[in-house]
Image (cartoon, grey):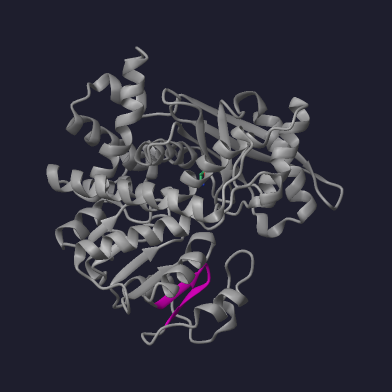
Amino acid sequence: MSTTKVLEKLSEEQKLEKESLNLFFSTQTVIKKALDKLGYSNEVFELLKEPIRMLTVRIPVKMDDGSVKVFTGFRSQHNDAVGPTKGGVRFHAEVNEEEVKALSMWMSLKCGIANLPYGGGKGGIICDPREMSFGELERLSRGYVRAISQIVGPTKDIPAPDVYTNSQIMAWMMDEYSRLREFDSPGFITGKPIVLGGSQGRETATARGVTICIEEAVKKKGIVLQGAQIVIQGFGNAGSFLAKFIHDAGAKVIGISDAHGALYNPEGLDIDFLLERRDSFGTVTNLFTNVITNQELLEKECDILVPAAVSNQITAKNAHRIKASIVVEAANGPTTLEATKILDKRGVLLVPDILASAGGVTVSYFEWVQNNQGYYWSEEEVDEKLRKVMVESFETIYQTSQAHQVDMRLAAYMVGIKKPAEASRLRGWV
Ligand code: GLU
């Protein structure tokens, strides 16, 4: 059943919660509010409320057992007034068109916040990479690039890693694109292995960005980072590196989780041990017996809560029970709009996803710049440049939220949407 049909059958209250769980709808709602606050006309909203381009592709892949399986993939481009579109490609069984559209809109916002010369893009393939062999994944990755090749390219739309895609997948995609075009095209995709033109610091960039946001947020709340208690939901790329960085910075990581469960110890967890034992999908709790649920973990006593897993984790149902005074969203969309309101009313400082997770695309931009100029930077240089972008973005959004008396999410949307709105206006589109 379509979302609209489902919504028609529900009561007003159920509708509100359902709508706020729908990423695409809630993204449109906040974009509308942000544009209104900034004084843009409804025409600007009409342009920015949907991606300008959405391609659905079917990808036949020869499976190891000799059969052919046809996969469905998407590539969404939200707005290219600022520059080429940019954003990751996710491999996940629950990928769907609406989600990819919403995620491409978020990429526009992230690029606007970090002041990058890009619009937002996003891609996805409906598949379960955990069930697929290396060879099948390679054929699927190459097939996807062939299917979308007409609308992507180093000056059109630049893909990158996202949920369950990594540097190896970027390498296959870059190779396929280079073969199609018959020249080496490292700038076609970011998040590549270093030897193929990847950037130092790209793999850890999202976690570095989140760490910087935590450092800035504790200053605002008057919390000392040394010894502060942190709970991290999710132990994938963002969650695991974050656990390491924040532990090294002196904070106490007292909870972590993966898709199967959570570990909690108020005395602090042995992060180095957990990092050593996690598998490539971030699973580690299967080694323990004293496991609690992800939902239980979110409600544990702590100073800082970092949802770094999937969307819709903090909702109107559990927002009252969140104990943390700072919530930093490393995942995309972990808190619904209703829950955002509840947390804001309770005085919780919420660092929204489009700010907290902007480190990844920022270093992707650095990678693309290095590819274009053919001259590569040291890790220190990348980290220093990333820090500057993140600190400035955090401060701008914090000040916007104070000046306009709005929550941090709306403030982030206001900062993020301004650039595509202004660029569209100056090009004479609206
Ligand atoms: N997938 C990441 C994100 O959602 C990175 C995108 C990129 O590096 O282009 O921000």
Quadrant assignment for the N terminus = top left
Which is the main secondary structure of the residues drawn in magenta? strand
In depth, the one of 184 and 157 nearer the eye is: 184
Counting from the top left corner in percent of width and height, residue 388 is at 37, 49
Question: Which quadrant of the view contains residue 273?
Answer: bottom right
Q: Is residue 60 left or right of residue 170?
A: right
Regarding residue 310, the answer to whether it shows in the image is no
Regarding residue 212, the answer to whether it shows in the image is yes
In depth, the one of 13 and 205 nearer the eye is: 205
How many numbered discs, if any? 0
Counting from the top left corner in percent of width and height, residue 182 is at 78, 26
Residue 226's place in the image compared with 425, above or below, is below
Residue 179's place in the image compared with 87, above or below, is above
Residue 169's place in the image compared with 299, above or below, is above
Question: Which quadrant of the view contains residue 80?
Answer: top left
Question: Which quadrant of the view contains residue 282?
Answer: bottom right
Q: Is residue 229 left or right of residue 166?
A: left
Question: Of all residues shown, which one is farthest toward the right?
Answer: 66
Q: Which residues are magenta?
A: 253-264
Q: Is 258 inside the magenta-drawn segment?
A: yes
Quadrant assignment for the C terminus = top left
Residue at the location (46% across, 61% down)?
Answer: 309
Residue at the location (20% across, 49% down)?
Answer: 407
Residue 30's place in the image compared with 209, above or below, is above
Q: Is residue 94 left or right of residue 2?
A: right
Q: Is 218 inside the magenta-drawn segment?
A: no
